[in-house]
Amino acid sequence: MKEFDFVVIGSGIAGLTFALKAAKHGSVAVITKRNGADSNTAWAQGGVACVTSEEDSFELHVRDTLDAGAGLCDEATVRTVVTEGPARIRDLTDLGLHFDDREVSGHREPDLGREGGHSKRRVLHVQDVTGREIEVTLLRELQRSSTVQLFENHMAVDLITAGKLGFATEDRCLGVYVLDEKTAAVETIRTDRLVLATGGCGKVYLYTTNPDVATGDGVAIAWRAGATIANMEFIQFHPTCLFHPNAKSFLISEAVRGEGGVLRNNRGDDFMARYHPLKSLAPRDIVARAIDAEIKRSGANCVFLDITQKSPEFLRERFPHIYETCLRFGVDMVKQPIPVVPAAHYQCGGIKTDVNGATTLPGLYAIGEVASTGLHGANRLASNSLLEGIVVSHRALSALRVQPAAHPSRSITLPEWRPGNVQDVDELVVIYHNWDEIRRLMWDYVGIVRTDKRLQRASARLRNLQREIREFYWNFKITVDLLELRNLATVAALIVDSAVSRKESRGLHYTLDHPETDDGHFKRDTLLTRM
């Protein structure tokens, strides 16, 4: 059994920020199921929303966040994240990260981007590869620490809790079982401070902007351990994913629209003028639904994002990654509009936490996209997620440091993993078929626009799939593929159950059977807890 003062599962901005700060106060294990750099953070193009300009204010950023969240944001959490943001940005720049700037009246100031739903330019960025640069910076610093161990190609299987072990004391998280992918052995890791930073669940949908690692692992293992899950019906679909048969999950940043990009239908019309006063800079949920409606109305495969009015020099300097990637697929954004479609992008719900990342299960914290802190409500304001990651990770460490170093549960001996009488997986095609079926039914029945009938069909099929997967799980040796399938099925069911219970349309949850917003009955979080 390995033992650490802090265990972090996930290696995105939230997990690595927490690990770097925790390393000054004890031993830290960072567990990640692929390489350290494989995370949603590394794919983030837009940047970090933060008030740094004299033309901006905390009040404006708070208002924009609350407006986007459609009545479900926790205002105290929003104010905390927004006001503490500048200090956490300084933490990043102190590590050597340099955001783009420009010369104004003889001095340098941040080159701020603007994205949908923002009333001011406030998005700090590094060209169009902000997330990748943050990830590289944090991993570089992590590798210099002598008190942090990075366990790559290790995947969390399940949390170890006092309740599962049959103790009558307060239920709490005691550690985690982890699969070493290379040896196929399941290790026992002991800690009183476990932090889930596993990111989102984009791969539960057929089309997504997320990397392959985004299989909802953190939400699933927290659910199985008894933690409360909140607002999983609110899945944000990014309006503009590159539409090309060979382009896998490539996002066209909202910053392109922030710099003047216009959405046009297959006739060349600026159709967003019919849907919202902000046109192409409307909040993401509105833009995604508008594109979905245009595609269905016209029968076209996609719409187009047109920024050809900008100079070639500007586009190549501001969006080098997007420009080069589009060019590789035969689309020259300097000369022609970019074909785009919506795709699953961000999980606004997650493990219910407070603003410090504390879950309902003592000893377990959740930070980043896996958590539902109350910041995003029913719809995330663009580029608020990286900000949340650095603010809440800092607060989580502060909260965990005040806990006693030696909790009474230290005396509990944790059992080793018992695989039972299982055999090697004989037919991987079963796993791949179920994986594909889940993703297709979620896209078809639980997508941008929903109905009661579609949700009921999805629920019925998912129950059958979960039974099949459960039987498979207990009869065969576990693998990463099997664990991810198990987690995908769990998260899909949580999304559907949450959506079924919300008989209104709000934010990212839009249903044709209940098109109006009902503040009288549903201006509240959707909370699910395993009994």
Image (cartoon, rainbow, N blue to C red):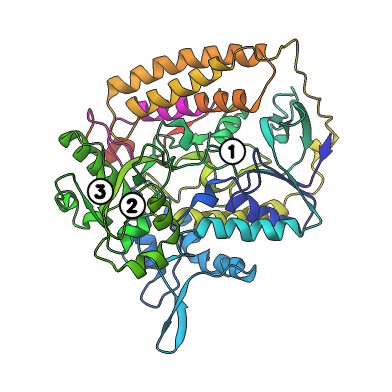
Percent coordinates x, y for residue 35 in the rendering: 65, 44
- Residue at image mark 2: 68
Q: With respect to residue 91, does 416 lie above or below?
A: above
Percent coordinates x, y for residue 509 in the rendering: 32, 37
Secondary structure beneath dot 3 equals strand
54 sits left or right of 475 in the view: left
Of labels 3 and 2, earlier in sequence is 2
Residue type at tag 1: Thr
| Residue 227 shows in this picture | no
Q: At x 63% / y 61%, what residue is drawn?
A: 137
Residue type at tag 2: Ala
- Residue at image mark 3: 304
Q: With respect to residue 159, does 109 lie above or below?
A: below
Q: How many marks?
A: 3
User: What's the CA distance linking mark 3 and mark 1?
Assistant: 44 Å
- Residue at image mark 1: 360
Q: Magenta residues, as a range?
A: 491-512
Of labels 3 and 1, earlier in sequence is 3
Secondary structure beneath dot 1 equals loop
Of labels 2 and 1, earlier in sequence is 2
Q: Nearer the viewer, residue 328 or 162?
A: 328
Residue type at tag 3: Phe
